[in-house]
Amino acid sequence: MMHDRTAEEYVLRVAIKARSLDLAPLLQEVDRLEADDFYHPKNAAVWRAICAVVRKDETVDAGSVILQLRDTGQLGAGLESDYIYALTANAQPESYRQLARHGDTIRAMAFRRRSVLACQLATEELGVRENSSEEIMERLVETQLHEIQAYRDGTKGAHVSDDLLETALERVDAGQPLYDPGDEKLVRTGYRDIDALLSGGKGLRSGDLAVLGALTSHGKTSFTIGLAINAIREGKRVLMISTELPPDQVLGRMVSYWTSGKVGIDQWLREGYEHTDQVRYLLETIQKSKSVIQQIKNATPQSVQTMLRSARVKGHEYDLCIIDFLNEMDPTPDSTTREANNHMRVTRIVRDLAGLAATEKLPILLCAQLNREGAHQDTPSLHHFRESGSIEEHATIGMVLHRPERNNPNAEKNMAIVKVAKNRNGPTAQVRLSFKPGGFRFDTYVPPTIPLNFRDPKERR
């Protein structure tokens, strides 16, 4: 067993009672322990909240921790306020003396898990890479040993390598930017105003986990289909995974989108695609790009990783992965799956997909569903994502798609709003799109026109 629940709960109990104790030991543990050192996601969330309260110079108690959890959207989804109060039930002032010892236990367990992960990564690399085993092991072991040593020293990767500094100085002397994208994959969404916000107008880039949230029937699938078509037209290879729709229905929606509804989904499924040259052009473009549409029920991050790595071994790397949608996925099986509730399940999926985007060096677009509270808001936000507040933490880009007319009959017709609520590589803003119901299609926003013979009713006599 590579975790100690008793030690984790002990540290949390004593930390929450800190208002009646000397703060020095707690501040020391805040600097030493990280949320990722905790094995149980629920305890990690509580420790993250405690650290946030401490760093804001506020009093640490059950109320302040609960308020912090509520503000970050983590309360109520597998983590109730009763758990916080239960932690403080048996905490005694003198128990503070053993806080450091239990903190060391948590760090030691985290060290063991990181060591096992290093072995797993080496095994996976040996199975899919064509490089020699000695080369792979040397690189992986060196990387992992540096990380583990930094962790044991308490530096946690704070050192910057001499090679990196030397390269940076060379770029400064040459008048070049410090960051070199190199072979980085850049994928434009095709929606002009959204691309302008992402990565300086370049769109999605390698390592991005972009999460798109929307209420039911607001068009998240149509939005991603449009994005996929735009990427394919630019020669990008797209892996589109649907957890609900079979490939022929997804392709039918792509045809309807491309023809602006001239060839409907039912017509495509029943009569084929020979009705128009537009359809043939679209299908030939998809075929030429070697893009793949796949249905995977109960998909896991591991199954997605298998498809990506299998294509890479064959020499056909994907430029973009689209997954529709999060709430129908399962976490990668491991020893904690049996005890995971919905909140923990979604948290693990999002965290694993964020890691997958980084390791596979491509952008991943993940669709997610908003909760019912979002239906009553003029413009939903990130905290309305269903069953998890972890999306705010792990996603590189967080977007919310909303069609006001669905909830407000007085709102502008056939208009959608995409709120870029989180963007690590650019600004946040709201973008308007035009929606064409006939083809389930989103386009660059065009304001409604006013007839030439229009006359303001106030001017009439």
Image: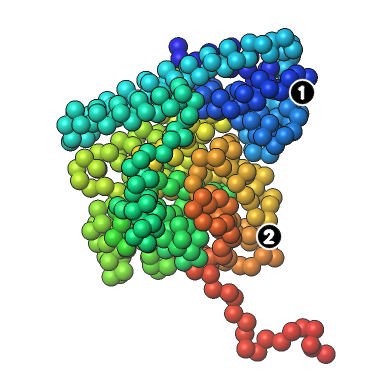
Dot 2: within a 10 Å radius of its alpha carbon, few (fewer than 14), some, or many (20 or more) residues? few
The amino acid at mark 2 is Asn
Q: Nearer the viewer, mark 1 or mark 2?
A: 1
Specify which label sits upstream in the sequence, 1 or 2.
Answer: 1
Dot 1: within a 10 Å radius of its alpha carbon, few (fewer than 14), some, or many (20 or more) residues? few
- Quadrant of residue 266 within the rendered picture: bottom left
Task: Out of 283 and 365, give the one closest to the viewer.
Answer: 365
Q: Residue at x 64, y 68 (%)?
A: 412
Quarter of the image for the N terminus: give it: top left
Residue 303 seen by the camera: yes
13 up-or-down from 277: above or below: above
Q: Residue at x 38, y 21 (%)?
A: 115
Alpha carbon separation for disc pair 1 and 2:
47 Å
Task: Out of 94 and 448, give the one closest to the viewer.
Answer: 94
Task: Out of 294 and 399, give the one closest to the viewer.
Answer: 399
- Quadrant of residue 452 within the rendered picture: bottom right
Residue 241 seen by the camera: no
Report x, y in % for residue 284.
24, 62
Left or right: where does residue 108 sit relative to residue 386?
left
Give the number of marks: 2
Mark 1 — residue? 19
Report x, y in % for residue 220.
50, 53
Could you tell me which secondary element the residue under label 1 belongs to?
Answer: helix
Q: Which mark is residue 408?
A: 2
